[in-house]
Amino acid sequence: MKQLSFSFNWNEKLSNKAFTTMRLSDRLEVGDEIKVSLKEKILPHIYLVKDKKSLKLESINDFIAYLDTGYDKKNCANLLMTFYKNKNINWTTQKINLYLIVRID
């Protein structure tokens, strides 16, 4: 089973039955059942990748940013760029996957 890792519980989203996450990786697909970890501790639930949308950094609006991180779009963009600061990324062309994750147990 695939695992999705978080270093921080942005917007306290991991306490909800459903949440979103933005990732550069394509390794998750709609229909995947996954485990979720927070700071290397696996949460006691199984989750389903319910939906996946691809977008560019410039397409992230306040609606998406606040739901996912609890911050406005500018601060959300800064967070993403900080997470991936050690990678050589062209943020005008980079695809960002927005995943909808739903707890199923």
Image (cartoon, rainbow, N blue to C red):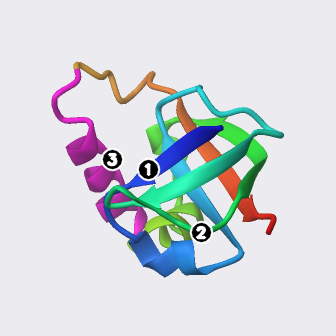
**Quarter occupied by residue 31:** top right
Tell me the mark number nearer the camera, choosing from 2 and 1: 2
State the extent of the magenta-drawn residues as a range: 72-87
Please tell me which residue is depicted at 46% across the width and 42% down the height of the picture: 58
Horizontal side of residue 71 vs 55, given as left or right: left
Q: What element carries label 2?
A: loop
| Sequence-earlier tag: 3 or 2 | 2
The answer to whether residue 70 of the structure is visible from this angle is no
| Sequence-earlier tag: 3 or 1 | 1
Q: In which quarter of the image is the N terminus?
A: top right
Q: Quadrant of the C terminus?
A: bottom right
Q: Name the residue under label 2.
A: 44
Q: Which amino acid does label 1 sit on?
A: Ser
Q: Name the residue under label 1.
A: 5
Please tell me which residue is depicted at 51% across the width and 67% down the height of the picture: 62
Q: What element carries label 3?
A: helix
Q: Residue furthest left?
A: 86
Taking depth in this image into account, of 56 and 103 the one nearest to the observer is 103
Q: Which amino acid does label 3 sit on?
A: Leu
Q: Residues within 10 Å of mark 3 (few under 14, many from 20)?
A: some
**Cα–Cα gap, marks 3 and 2:** 27 Å
Instruction: State the mark number for residue 24.
Output: none
Seen in the picture, residue 59 relative to 11 is either above or below; the reply is above
**Quarter occupied by residue 32:** top right
Q: Mark 3 points at which residue?
A: 80
